Image (cartoon, rainbow, N blue to C red):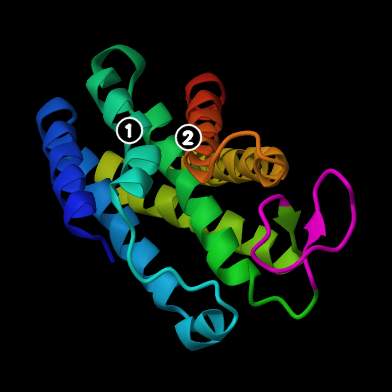
Amino acid sequence: MLDKGGILLAVVFGAILLISGGPAYLALMLAFFLLAVIVTRYEYEIKRDMGLYEHERGWENVLSNGLLPAILAILSPFIGPMPFIASLAAVMADKFGSEIGVLAAENPVSILEFKPVKPGTSGGMSSLGTVASLAGATTIGACAIFAFGLNPTQALLVGLAGLAGSIADTVFGVFEERGFGTKGTTNFICSLVGALFGYYFIR
């Protein structure tokens, strides 16, 4: 799923997570990567026919999704693990929402203009995509129960923090469609919002 540059950068981030945070941080990132591969491959024939299937990702995608979690792992002795967990949940929510949401029977609606848009349009939301976003984020929360010892309430809050990050991603996706920012900056904002929710609201 990654080209050579993407694999190299992913290995670097993995080493940072292991050294700075420890095995639990790396394990959660590996769970994230496995889930991302699974949801990307889900109904890929349909997404390919729609022109929305991305078979290979590059270093830019790895950077936008992995930079903040790596920084949060380095800062974990001071801020704890919740911002890291919630940032991954946000990116996972965005991934599930975009990969599954495009399969909805109805067209998504622009989150700011409330007008139907084509599937795959940044800034578009559908009921299926929203449910999928919450499911993806909560799955990361469930994985964190085993990796970090979270309790079920914390895992559910991680899911909600991830959903908040995904919604922020959708909002900024509207500006991306208008030429302000890129997919990379939108992804970074998504993970940042998730991290902030994790830091301030999950104990």
- Residue at x 54% of width, y 32% of height: 189
> Residue 58 in magenta?
no
Residue 152 visible in the shown view: no
Q: Identity of the amino acid at label 2?
A: Phe
Q: Which residues are magenta?
A: 107-123
| View extreme (front): residue | 179
**At which x and y percent is residue 60?**
35, 44
**Sequence-earlier tag: 2 or 1:** 1
- Residue type at mark 1: give it: Leu
CA–CA distance between discs 2 and 1? 8 Å
Quadrant occupied by the N terminus:
bottom left
**Tag of residue 107:** none
Asked if 166 appears above or below 131 in the picture, the reply is: above
Residue at 67% from the left image edge and 38% from the top image edge: 172
Badge 2 marks a residue whose secondary structure is helix
Q: Pointer 1: residues within 10 angstroms few (<14), some, or many (20+)? A: some
Q: Residue 114: within the magenta?
A: yes
Q: Residue sitting at 75 percent across and 63 percent down?
A: 126
Q: Position of residue 139 (x, y in %)?
A: 45, 57
Q: Which residue is mark 1?
A: 67
Mark 2 closeness class: few <14, some 14–19, many ≥20 residues within 10 Å:
many
User: In the drawing, what numbered circle is on residue 188?
Assistant: 2
What residue is drawn where x is 33% and y is 21%? 80
The answer to whether residue 3 is above or below residue 5 is below
Residues 119 and 40: in front is 119
- The spot of residue 79 in percent (x, y) is 35, 16
Q: From the viewer's perspective, tell me whether residue 82 is left or right of residue 202.
A: left
Q: Are marks 2 and 1 in contact (CB under 8 Å)?
A: yes
Residue that sits furthest to the right in the current view: 114
Q: Magenta part mainly helix, strand or loop?
A: loop
- The answer to whether residue 34 is seen in the rendering is yes
Rendered view: 50 above or below 37? below
